[in-house]
Image (spheres, grey):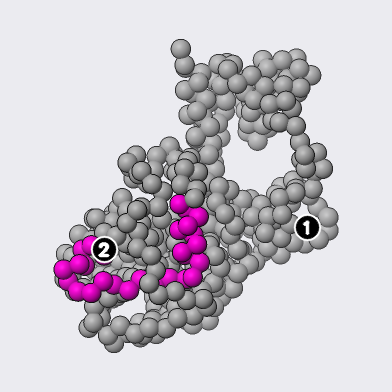
Amino acid sequence: MADLLELSSRLFDSGELTEPPNRITQELSELADDIAMVESFSHVVIFRTDDGLVLFDTSHDLTARPCVEALRRWTDLPIHSIVYTHGHVDHVGGSGAFVADNADRGPTPQVIGHENIRPRFQRYRLTDGYNSAINARQFGGRSIGSDELAQFLAPDVVEPTTEFETTHQFRVGQLEFELRHDRGETDDHAWAWIPAHKAIAVGDLFMWVFPNAGNPQKVQRYPAEWAVALRSMAALAPELLLPAHGLPMVGAHRITEALETTAAALEGLVTDTLHLMNAGATLDTIIHEVRVPDEMLARPYLHPTYDEPEFIVRNIWRLYGGWYDGNPSHLKPPTDAVLAATIAELSGGVASLVARAVQAATGEDLRLACSLVELAVQADPDNREAHGARAEIYAERRRVERSLMARGIFGHASRSSRALSEKD
């Protein structure tokens, strides 16, 4: 079936997203002879060889079982190898299900990944509760697809059995796979060149949204090196692009344009941010001045609906400049509660802050409205009127934002205050 490639080409060529490019159907599509993809969270990309299957990523543990079932409706061949494009839980969480399914079909699959995946797993186990809380905010108050996730990293996740630092080549049956490491969304990311198919398996380095290089709740991202990876891919003139999220893409002209334009967007953010940092600008100035051109954000594969440029600017600052933002009062500040109470006292009380916040929201200055109403609830955490206003303001803020990152945090704030404002 070539439906996915036809849809991808139509969206790319028209320049309009008339249909969502990121889907979780749990269905398998055959993209070319012996190449298939199960659309899930994340996708599972499959190469069929004479010696068995090679899988790129295994989806999340909550979506893995339907992925396995979709795979087995296509082929009964054993799994020879699993490649982790990186260690995010939606890429490795389903590994236990795939390995268990393979138990009666052949030897245990080799699992290949970058050498930083194992330390990532260790960090996830150390910060299990924190990462679960992040997911609850980021994805609208629930874990991926369910409220049943007991651990952030599934206990049956399979550790890599083959690790590499920079490059790794391996053959399965008639196919050669060339793995390359580049830092981008993560420090453990790998992408693959499959010469026989002129195909690249790119993981999350391209996924039909603006690059996830600034996630405000996650560890450091690397936008400059991400751009280098994209340009390295484009130099190969691939004819098939296989992402872990979003639609596959066919045609060297489309793929090259998409990769190079995305690289240019990241490079522009890095260059402009560093220029202002070197000129002595504060973070406050930079995040309000550095922009990606609107015509670039209008590309169907660069809509800021997951991450967004403003967050990436903050990540660039963190990478090159640390956490000090240029405001000396932020170096060793009072507690938020003490500052908020003082401002409330000076402004005539919490009610005055709430009234001014509502006025700002009515005037569509939601940045100011959120800051003021936040001061109000910090000054008086039990004030139901303040929480009622906060719930409404953040609900409106969520409504007008585009990125999932912002919508998730603002929605969580709104729900939290809604519960407090209605509490008996």
Secondary structure under the numbered disc 1 in the rendered image: helix
Magenta stretch encompasses residue 45: no
Residue drawn at the location 69% of the way across and 30% of the way down: 336
- Residue 395 lies, in percent from the top left, at 51, 31
Residue linked to disc 1: 277
The number of numbered badges drawn on the structure is 2
User: In this orientation, which residue lies closer to the viewer: 204 or 118?
Assistant: 118
Relative image position of residue 13 (x, y in whole percent):
44, 66
Residue 301 in view (yes/no): no
Q: Nearer the viewer, residue 362 or 325?
A: 325
Q: Is residue 248 left or right of residue 286?
A: left
The region drawn magenta spans: 98-125
Residue under label 2? 98
Q: Is residue 118 magenta?
A: yes
The answer to whether residue 352 shows anywhere in this view is yes
Q: Earlier in the sequence, mark 1 or mark 2?
A: 2
CA–CA distance in space, label 1 to label 2: 47 Å
Q: Which residue is at 71% across, 47% downward?
A: 288
Residue extending farthest to the top is: 424
Amino acid at the residue labelled 2:
Phe
Q: Quadrant of residue 68?
A: bottom left
Tag 1 near tag 2, CB within 8 Å: no
Tag 2 secondary structure = helix
Residue 105 place in picture, x, y as percent = 17, 71
Locate residue 121: give its quadrant: bottom left
